[in-house]
Amino acid sequence: MPVYGNLIGGKWVKPASGRTFESLDPATGRPIGTFQSSTEKDIKKAVSAARKAFPGWKAVPAPERGQMLFRIAELLRKDKEGLASLETREMGKAINEARGDVQEAIDIAEYMAAEGRRLLGHTTPSELPDRFCATIKQPVGVFGLITPWNFPIAIPAWKLMPALIAGNTIVFKPSSDSPLCAIEFVKILEKAGIPPGVVNLVTGSGRDAGGPLVKHKDVGGISFTGSMETGIWITQNAGLKKVGLELGGKNPIIVMDDADLDLAVDGVLWGGYATTGQRCTAASRVIVHEKVLKAFERKLLARIGKLKVGNGMDPKTDVGPLVNKAAVDKTESYVKLGKDEGARLCCGGKRIARKGFFFQPTLFTNCSMDMKICQEEIFGPIVSLIPVKGFSQAIDAANSVDYGLSSAIYTSSMKRAFRAIELMDAGITYVNSSTIGAEVHLPFGGTKATGNGTREAGIEGLNEFTETKAVYIDYSGRLQKAQKIK
Ligand code: TXE
């Protein structure tokens, strides 16, 4: 079994604890590698290496940093197939989707590389004569990145690329369910010429490695994607650091009575069961106009019956395994809860008796918004159908959860589409398209419990990783006082 180290100050090293853990292939339950169970001591070393590297990296002109990001994109492109296969082996998603994950990393690397020639501030007039006013973007310093396993290359790339182009140095703590993807990704950054100490990688548990990173006084910011519980813990323990949080969703698709039902079925299948429902943007609630409920349910059931569940490496697989046994247990517990709450189980509902962590694509109907299966993030292949009487009830149902990440409406009415864009309380709204499929040049993030207002990707994605400095240059040659002070 290969044993992998941490990357600290440009060297691959073993942790102070001497302890290790294994990452499993969720399709077989077999281990694919042994990784370091790091602790506070390792985090301290990594932060110190990142601190040492910071002045040098900040001094590299941003366009030159951009050249390195372009090289990263090129290397990712060359190794796309290898990385996608690794991803499927380590976290289970269907190979075609894994390719999409690597593509997203390529896209964000190129997008942020080009930012090296922009990183725009703005100029603005002064209230005084002979005074020039502008803003510039500056790096924060050492940034801690804490990531989940569901997009084990794209999410780290979404954080690393803007952090690097802005001139920050990094300590990256990936999920213990996808450490090998993180390691192979970081090796590509090394190959592209990112100097030693600029990106450090420390594997280990959330408590023993993630916690000390969040609390470290020399870390200027934390960017986190994961569960709401951990996100809340981070805000309570990060002190005055800059914190960016992306904490998932309970994303609705509204299907109106004037919708193209076949198109809506395509959207629900893709949004609800792709990545085995383990996307923060997964369409876990489908709010259907009662007039078309029966027809929609029938069409959807027929298509769910055709989904092929299996090892993600098989190109015919639609639905891969869940990430680990805990995820299977959690999904199963929500099936029981749904039945107890009075929802009608239309199909699925059971773990699949074979090696690995497989669960049947599951559909509940007759659901209501007060049910826990309609309120809580399950992160498994469960979709709930919620009947409504009309548009305003549909909007109320869509908005009546704690989260506000993605949302969608299927309708042929322009008026309803624009109303929904206005009224759905979410960071993202799709019209006649599913809740998943974000593009890297648009901002990604949500309202309410989905986060703390930060956005990733797009131009807005740079704000999380930069400080904005206001600059005043007086060329009058005399003391000038603002606010009309004589
Ligand atoms: O998340 P955690 P898990 C949701 C989803 C899923 C559930 C649990 O509902 O079923 O969370 O998944 C690190 N200090 N999402 O257990 O625990 C941890 O090591 C610092 C939604 O994977 O939040 C990992 O690197 N770090 C989601 C990362 O946080 C800590 C994606 C995420 O782990 C820490 C994933 C601590 N105290 C899960 N505790 C989305 N938004 O897409 C844990 N970590």
Image (tube, helix red, strand yellow):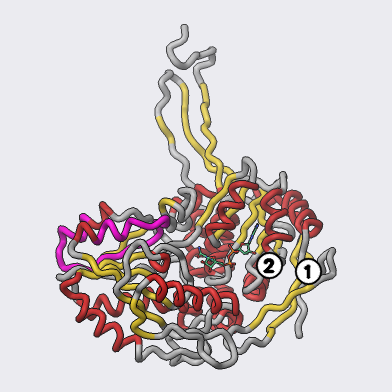
**Residue drawn at x 41%, y 76% as measured from the top left:** 382
Where residue 269 sits in the image (x, y, percent)?
35, 79
Residue range in magenta is: 394-419
Q: CA distance from mark 1 to mark 2?
A: 11 Å
Q: Nearer the viewer, mark 1 or mark 2?
A: 1
From the viewer's side, name the closer residue of 376 and 25: 376
Q: Is mark 1 within 8 Å of ligand 1?
A: no
128 lies above or below 346:
above
Where residue 376 sits in the image (x, y, percent)?
45, 64
* Amino acid at circle 1: Trp
Where residue 291 sits in the image (x, y, percent)?
16, 73
Specify which label sits upstream in the sequence, 1 or 2: 1
- Ligand 1 location (quadrant): bottom right
Point out the image quarter for the N terminus: bottom right
Left or right of 254 in this view: 35: right
**Residue drawn at x 46%, y 89% as measured from the top left:** 309
Q: Is residue 416 a member of the stretch shown in magenta? A: yes
Residue to which mark 2 is pinned: 190
Q: Quadrant of residue 75?
A: bottom right
Q: Is residue 188 a member of the stretch shown in magenta? A: no
Label for residue 43? Answer: none
